[in-house]
Amino acid sequence: HLICFDKSMNEDNILRKINCPVSLISSDGVGFCEEDSRRGQLVHPRCFGAFPRFLGRYVREALSLKWEKAIQKITSIPALKYGINDRGFIQKDLKADIAILDPNKIIDRATLDNPFQYSLGVRYVLVNGKLVVDKANHTGELAGEIVVK
């Protein structure tokens, strides 16, 4: 099931799809930083907040899913679906892609008018076991890699 967070979509349909047992949550957004706003490039808000929007608006605020199921829909379920065998779980010998967030504060701030806004509530992020966000600030570490399946 494809779930799209778009102003033109009916909220009831979004909630119904989020709660479907076989749905998963993913994004085709790419990484940008606030400084990229000076380039005049067209950027969609999902590049700054797809997952914080899902967790803040649809999990915490709409109470549509339990946190455990929501986290599975953005981690282990997509990894299993797409055969990415070294990610999606916290387990010895797997890649350590981990986000530590505050469930009471996680939310997106990016809008169509001003997409270059970081989300709130993300405290730490490890990518491939390296700290890339420390106390909500980027460390300068570029630890990501292309995953081809």
Image (cartoon, rainbow, N blue to C red):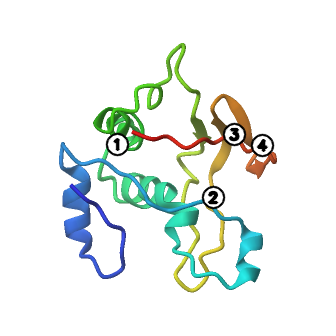
Query: Quadrant where the C terminus lies?
Result: top left
Compute the Cα span from label 4 to label 3: 6 Å
Foreground tag (3 vs 2)? 3
In percent of the image, x 57 and y 34: which residue is there?
Answer: 97
The image quarter containing residue 37 is bottom right
- SS label for mark 2: loop
Q: Residue furthest front?
A: 148
Q: Which residue is mark 2?
A: 120
Give the label on residue 141, or none: 4
Whole-percent x and y of residue 106? 56, 54
Going from N to C along the chain, the mark reached first, 1 or 3, is 1
Whole-percent x and y of residue 117? 65, 70
**In the depicted structure, whether residue 64 falls above or below residue 100:** below
Give the label on residue 73, or none: 1
Going from N to C along the chain, the mark reached first, 2 or 1, is 1
Answer few, some or many: residues within 10 Å of disc 3's Cα (few below 14, many 20 plus, some between 14 and 19). Answer: few
- SS label for mark 3: loop
- SS label for mark 1: helix
Compute the Cα span from label 2 to label 4: 20 Å
Going from N to C along the chain, the mark reached first, 4 or 1, is 1
Q: Which residue is mark 3?
A: 143
Q: Amino acid at mark 2?
A: Leu
Foreground tag (4 vs 1)? 4
In percent of the image, x 19 and y 67: which residue is there?
Answer: 13
